[in-house]
Image (cartoon, grey):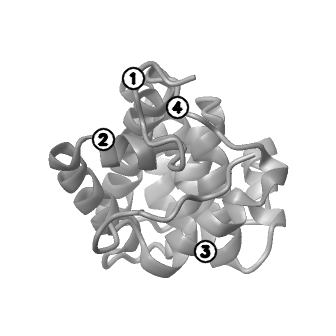
Amino acid sequence: MPHIPLPPHLPGITGLLEYRLDTAAPIRELTQLLLRGESTLSTGERELIAALVSSRNCTNFCEAAHTKAADLLLGETDTTRAVKADLETAPISEKLKALLQIAALTQQSGRAVTPEVVDRARTAGATDREIHDTVLIAALFCLYNKYVDGLNTVAPALESGYYDVLGERITGRGYVRPPGGYPAPVQVT
């Protein structure tokens, strides 16, 4: 049960964003810019950062939502699963491994990101902007994870099918609020 009254048909961060539209606007704008804006990292790679950080923070709603989005954008489910299990053995490029290591260290503590891991990313071909955006996405999802968990939002069961719908919404429309919000109740089981 959430710690504050939230729309029961809007689980996770969606209900929180509807609760305070004034604070939601810059949150949505920053998320849209970082995860859907112009970047040399693909949208799937950026969702992978969000899924990894949310997984390591044990935030079930965000992990499930961004895992589904990453899977849809990557066109398969094995990569996300492998990255969350062990990013060093996952079937991804050395550059992405290095960037995900930076994201994982950022999740632990910003100060855990050392010059050595940044050098590893640069050696693997990462640009300064990719390093910057990786840290910012990781830090942003730490904030979101604490926001969702700190207010004890509802997380639908994985098998409910909710995350399939949410993943389609995230990949199709991004992080922009639909005109008029979310009036139609979504079945949550």
Q: Is residue 1 placed above or below 81 in the rendered structure?
A: above
| In front: label 4 or label 1 | 1
Query: Gap in Å between the C-alphas at discs 2 and 1?
Result: 10 Å
Whether label 3 touches label 4, CB < 8 Å: no
Q: Earlier in the sequence, mark 3 or mark 4?
A: 4
Residue linked to disc 4? 153
Q: Is residue 59 placed above or below 188 in the rendered structure?
A: above
Q: Earlier in the sequence, mark 3 or mark 2?
A: 2
Q: Earlier in the sequence, mark 4 or mark 1?
A: 1
Whether label 2 touches label 1, CB < 8 Å: yes
Classify residue 142 by image quadrant.
top left
Whether label 3 touches label 1, CB < 8 Å: no
**Which amino acid does the dot numbered 1 rest on?**
Ile
Crowding at dot 2, Cα within 10 Å, few <14 / some 14-19 / many 20+, comes out as some
Q: Residue at x 50, y 65 (%)?
A: 184
**Which amino acid does the dot numbered 2 rest on?**
Tyr
Closer to the camera, 110 or 123?
110
**Which amino acid does the dot numbered 3 rest on?**
Glu
Classify residue 60 by image quadrant.
top right
Disc 4 element:
loop
Query: Gap in Å between the C-alphas at discs 3 and 4?
Result: 21 Å
Instruction: Using the image, tell me which numbered label, if any, was put on residue 4.
Output: 1
Residue linked to disc 2? 19
Disc 1 element:
loop
Hey, which residue is sitting farthest front in the picture?
184
Q: Residue at x 53, y 72 (%)?
A: 169
Taking the image as shown, residue 153 lies to the left or right of residue 155, namely: left
Instruction: Using the image, tell me which numbered label, if any, was put on residue 168.
Output: 3
Instruction: Using the image, tell me which numbered label, if any, was put on residue 25.
Output: none
